[in-house]
Image: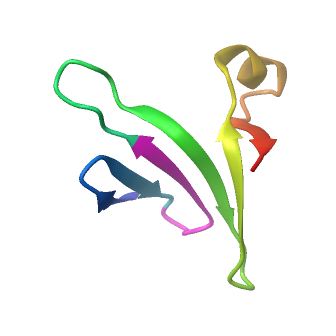
Amino acid sequence: MSKKTWVDSDHYRVTSDDGRSSRLYNSPGWFRPDTCVEVADHHSDGTTTAYEPASFVQSLLNGGDDRGSKK
């Protein structure tokens, strides 16, 4: 099961079961949906590669990959 961890009062990170990827979300409040603000790949050497989230169209064109441009 994925792990949800609050980063601060407005952001939380959901980490995959294997710990190799995560998504950072902005949680703005009751009446607005949570928004993904970062997609990250965690490498075995301890480094992380962060990406902007892909738009819906980018994701479709990339075969479902939700990674946009590298940060």
The quarter of the picture where residue 19 lies is bottom right
Whether residue 1 is visible to the viewer of this picture, yes or no, is no
Query: Does residue 22 sit above or below 44 in this rendering?
Result: above
Which residue is located at x 72 percent, y 77 percent?
Answer: 47
| Furthest residue toward left | 30
Which residue is located at x 75 percent, y 50 percent?
Answer: 71
Q: Which region of the structure is painted magenta?
A: 17-25
Residue 14 percent across, percent down from the top left: 42, 54
Residue 25 percent across, percent down from the top left: 43, 43
Determine whether, in the image, residue 43 is placed left or right of residue 5.
Answer: right
Determine whether, in the image, residue 69 is placed left or right of residue 15.
Answer: right
Q: Quadrant of the N terminus?
A: bottom left
Query: Does residue 47 sit above or below 67 in this rendering?
Result: below
Q: Is residue 16 magenta?
A: no
| Residue closest to the eye, 63 or 30 | 30
Query: Does residue 60 sit above or below 14 in this rendering?
Result: above
Which residue is located at x 48 percent, y 49 percent?
Answer: 24
Query: Does residue 6 sit above or below 48 in this rendering?
Result: above
The quarter of the picture where residue 65 lies is top right
Specify how the rendered protein is coloured: rainbow
Count numbered badges in the picture: 0
Whether residue 2 is visible to the viewer of this picture, yes or no, is yes
Determine whether, in the image, residue 42 is placed left or right of residue 16.
Answer: right
Residue 52 percent across, percent down from the top left: 68, 40
| Furthest residue toward bottom | 45
The quarter of the picture where residue 55 lies is top right
Residue 37 percent across, percent down from the top left: 53, 40
